[in-house]
Amino acid sequence: MFQPGTLVVYGATGVCRVEAIRHPEPRSGGQDKPCYLLKPLYQDGVIYTPVENRKVPIRPVMTREEADALIGLIPTMQAEACRAPTIQALTQHYQSVIHSGDRRDLIQLLMSIYAKQKQAEAQKRRLGMVDERYMKQAERLLYGELAAALDIPFDQVQPYIARRVEGTASAQT
C-alpha cells in the first residue's frame, strides 16, 4: 500500500500524488475497501480508486537512477516510423503501447512518431492527427514520470534528454 505523499504512476493518467487513503462508509451489504485519493500532477481533478485495483495498474515512480539509465539507453534504440494499413490499426497500436506502461516502449513510440514528423516536414506536410494526439499523450506520460524521478520541471525534461543524448553521442565519436 502506498502512503500519502507518495508519487505513483496511475495507468494512462500518469504521475499522481497519493493524497489520502480513505475507507468509504459500508453500504448495505457492501464491503469497506480502502481507496486512494490521487491528485494528478500534470492534469486537473482528483481520482478515487480502490487500493487493490485490478483494472488500472498503479506503480511507484521510477527512481533517479532508473531514469538516468533509461535515458542512457536512448542512443541505442532504433527510430523507425510506425506505419499501419489503417488509421484504426495505428490507433490500436498506439493505445496498446500507452496502456502497457512500459517506459522503453514509450520511448520507442515517441522516437517513431518523431521520425514520422521529420519525414512529413521534409515533404512539407503536417503530422497526422492520430500521431500528434498519441505523441502528446506519450510525452505527458514519459516526461511526467522523468520530471518526478529527476526532480526537475516538466518543461525541462526534453532539453535534459537532448543534453544527455548529445553528450553520449559526442563521447562515442
Image (tube, rainbow, N blue to C red):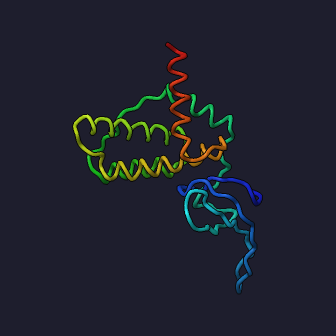
Question: At which x and y percent is residue 115?
Answer: 36, 35
Left or right: where 77 falls relative to 17: left
Q: Which residue is drawn at 57% across and 54% down?
A: 14
Q: Which of 37 and 105 is in front in this view?
A: 37
Q: Which of 135 and 153 is in front in this view?
A: 153
Left or right: where 96 falls relative to 141: left
Q: Residue at x 22, y 39 (%)?
A: 124
Question: At which x and y percent is residue 54?
Answer: 62, 60
Q: Nearer the viewer, residue 156 or 51?
A: 156
Name the quarter where the N terminus is drawn.
bottom right
Question: At which x and y percent is residue 105?
Answer: 49, 40
Q: Which of 86 and 137 is in front in this view?
A: 137
Residue 32 occupies quadrant: bottom right
Name the residue at the top extreme: 173
Q: Residue at x 52, y 15 (%)?
A: 172
Name the residue at the bottom extreme: 28
